[in-house]
């Protein structure tokens, strides 16, 4: 029988991280976005295992109200969602970067958070769409996603808004912080750099996007790529493209970008949303200056 005491990062820094200890071997945290508990694991034979079980639920849920999610290493470096959000807002204020709006999205099991921060002053298209620079902070309690900061755009069109995160596979970077001891924090200077490049370049992006016409071949190829998003969704998007063609006679790059951005903002699946955002990013023209962050 192995009775060695497993000292986890969460156990060692429980008070500092905001945990309570309602039962031996159980560490509980809650804030405005949800609750989570990390529980030590033993085998029936009495061996103490080198990882923690993760349970999560709605804010203030008791232990019985949480659902099992997965396991994490004892070295997992926890950060509470609210503490991350407060740190981001504080850094923006200290950096003199205007915050227009924060939007918080939680995964169904409360173990994942995506928080969008709409920044600065807008650029406006001839169609009167307002475009803002945006950063998205992602965090998970189960180690599935590293804490990440992703650049993007937030588009306000009529009474709706659409959000697009730029992929690290194309022109923009994604700054990640793994959940382990010694990981570095994000620098607000990267955000300031993105806002500066946005202000310098967005006028030319808009001008190019609202004047460039999509050819019939480009429309056909785009519709073909939509099939990756599922039959029902791709059919609906294809119908909307045809409706726009009948209404306008032709489509611009901006028309296609807005359509895909709209649907990307509606989907809940992270994988499908990412695929849509990747397609939207390849459609939108980006000058070289925006890539050199």
Image (cartoon, grey):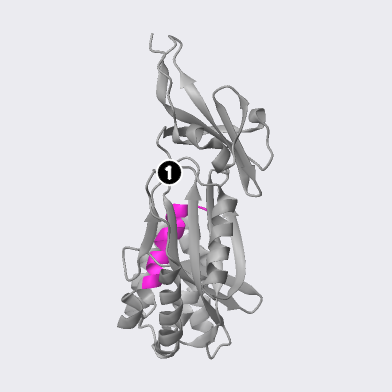
Point out residue 120 in the picture as x, y percentages from the top left corner: 55, 78
Q: Is residue 230 visible?
A: no
Point out residue 38 in the picture as x, y percentages from the top left corner: 53, 32
- Picture quarter with the N terminus: top left
Main secondary structure found in the magenta portion: helix
Residue in view at x 50 percent, y 42 percent: 141
Residue 254 vs 72, above or below: the answer is: below
Q: Is residue 266 left or right of residue 198?
A: right
68 and 3: which is toward the camera: 3
Residue in view at x 56 percent, y 88 percent: 127
Q: Is residue 270 visible?
A: yes
Whether the magenta-drawn stretch holds residue 269 is answered as yes
Numbered marks: total? 1
Q: Is residue 57 left or right of residue 70?
A: right
Residue 243 vs 46, above or below: the answer is: below
Q: Is residue 265 left or right of residue 194?
A: right
- Picture quarter with the C terminus: bottom left
124 and 13: which is toward the camera: 13
Residue 61 sits in quarter: top right
Whether the magenta-drawn stretch holds residue 156 is answered as no
Which region is colored magenta? 268-281
Residue indicated by mark 1: 144
Point out residue 222 in the picture as x, y percentages from the top left corner: 37, 71
161 and 147: which is toward the camera: 147
Point out residue 265 in the picture as x, y percentages from the top left corner: 53, 64
Residue 97 sits in quarter: bottom right
Residue in view at x 41 percent, y 45 percent: 179
Badge 1 element: loop
């Amino acid at each position: 029988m192995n009775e060695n005491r497993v000292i986890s990062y969460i156990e060692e820094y429980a008070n500092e991280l905001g945990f309570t200890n309602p039962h031996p071997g159980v560490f509980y945290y809650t804030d405005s976005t949800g609750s989570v508990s990390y529980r030590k694991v033993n085998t029936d034979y009495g061996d103490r295992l080198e990882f923690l079980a993760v349970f999560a639920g709605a804010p203030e849920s008791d232990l019985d109200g949480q659902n099992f999610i997965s396991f994490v290493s004892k070295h997992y470096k926890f950060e509470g969602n609210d503490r991350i959000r407060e740190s981001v807002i504080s850094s923006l204020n200290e950096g003199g970067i205007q915050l227009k709006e924060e939007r918080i999205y939680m995964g169904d099991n409360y173990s994942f958070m995506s928080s969008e921060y709409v920044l600065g002053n807008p650029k406006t298209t001839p169609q009167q769409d307002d475009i803002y620079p945006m950063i998205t902070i992602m965090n998970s309690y189960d180690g599935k996603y590293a804490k990440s900061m992703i650049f993007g755009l937030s588009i306000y069109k009529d009474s709706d808004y659409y959000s697009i995160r730029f992929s690290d596979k194309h022109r923009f970077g994604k700054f990640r912080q793994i959940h382990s001891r010694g990981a570095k924090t994000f620098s607000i200077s990267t955000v300031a750099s993105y806002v500066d490049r946005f202000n310098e370049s967005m006028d030319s992006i808009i001008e190019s996007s609202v004047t460039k016409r999509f050819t019939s071949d480009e429309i056909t190829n785009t519709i073909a790529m939509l099939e990756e998003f599922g039959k029902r969704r791709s059919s609906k998007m294809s119908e909307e493209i045809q409706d726009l063609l009948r209404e306008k006679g032709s489509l611009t790059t901006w028309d296609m970008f807005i359509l895909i951005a709209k649907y990307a903002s509606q989907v809940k699946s992270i994988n499908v949303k990412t695929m849509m955002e990747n397609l939207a990013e390849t459609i939108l023209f980006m000058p070289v200056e925006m890539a050199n962050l």
